[in-house]
Amino acid sequence: MKNIVILISGGGSNMAAIVKAAKQQDWERRYGARVAAVVSNKADAKGLVFAREQGIATEVLDHRQFASREDFDAALAQRIDPYQPAVVVLAGFMRILTPGFVQHFAGRMVNIHPSLLPAFTGLHTHQRAIDAGCKFAGCTVHGVTAELDVGPILDQAVVPVLPDDTAETLAARVLTQEHIIYPRAVAALLQQR
């Protein structure tokens, strides 16, 4: 079985989209894959409730309990490793990962970013796109490397930037596309493995 471990920090809407796609498209039969666990660095992450309701194992590891990023990432890897993940999915996991953690899961970890990479890495992507006068924005699924938001591009979706857009309205439109392309990109990875 190809196990998928999803890391979240909040509501988990991308995680939920992946879980729903896995069920609707029968990833277990098609790819021999399943979402094995959802891990959060926040005990109150609403996405954990959804995961538990779906019968998915959940884990919480509070980053504030560790003296350094390296210590947290080492403990996080120890939580993930027993699931023997074929893919580790970052779905709104709001932590910058250490090079050691990224290397540990090299070639198996993906992220989604709310811009058309390589444009607007980091935070506040929607406002930055509006401020720059972009006519289009979007989202990108990419492989995770030690450098933030620069890994290989696996999938992208484009949305128009409307004249009256705010960061919030643009973010909402981009999020609907995230929910389409992230499950699609994960399924494509599973097919390759």
Image (tube, grey):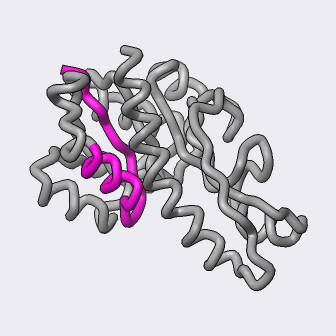
Q: Nearer the viewer, residue 65 or 128?
A: 128
Is residue 66 among the parts visible in the rendering? yes
The vertical placement of 28 against 90, above or below, is above
Can residue 13 be found in the magenta stretch?
A: yes
Give the side of residue 97 with respect to residue 184, left or right. right
Give the side of residue 159 with respect to residue 75, left or right. right
- Residue that sits furthest to the right in the current view: 132
Q: Position of residue 23 (x, y in %)?
A: 19, 44
Picture quarter with the N terminus: top left
Tell me which segment is drawn in magenta: 1-21
User: Tag count in the figure?
Assistant: 0
Q: Residue at x 20, y 22 (%)?
A: 32
Q: Position of residue 130 (x, y in %)?
A: 81, 71
Q: Position of residue 91 (x, y in %)?
A: 44, 49
Classify residue 184 by image quadrant: top left
Classify residue 179 by image quadrant: bottom left
Give the side of residue 61 with respect to residue 174, left or right. left
Q: Residue at x 53, y 49 (%)?
A: 95
Picture quarter with the C terminus: top left
- Residue that sits furthest to the top in the current view: 193
Can residue 34 be found in the magenta stretch?
A: no
Give the side of residue 153 with respect to residue 45, left or right. right
Q: Residue at x 68, y 39 (%)?
A: 148
Is residue 36 among the parts visible in the rendering? no
Q: Nearer the viewer, residue 98 or 45?
A: 45
- Residue that sits furthest to the bottom in the current view: 164
The vertical placement of 88 against 113, above or below, is above
Q: Residue at x 65, y 27 (%)?
A: 152
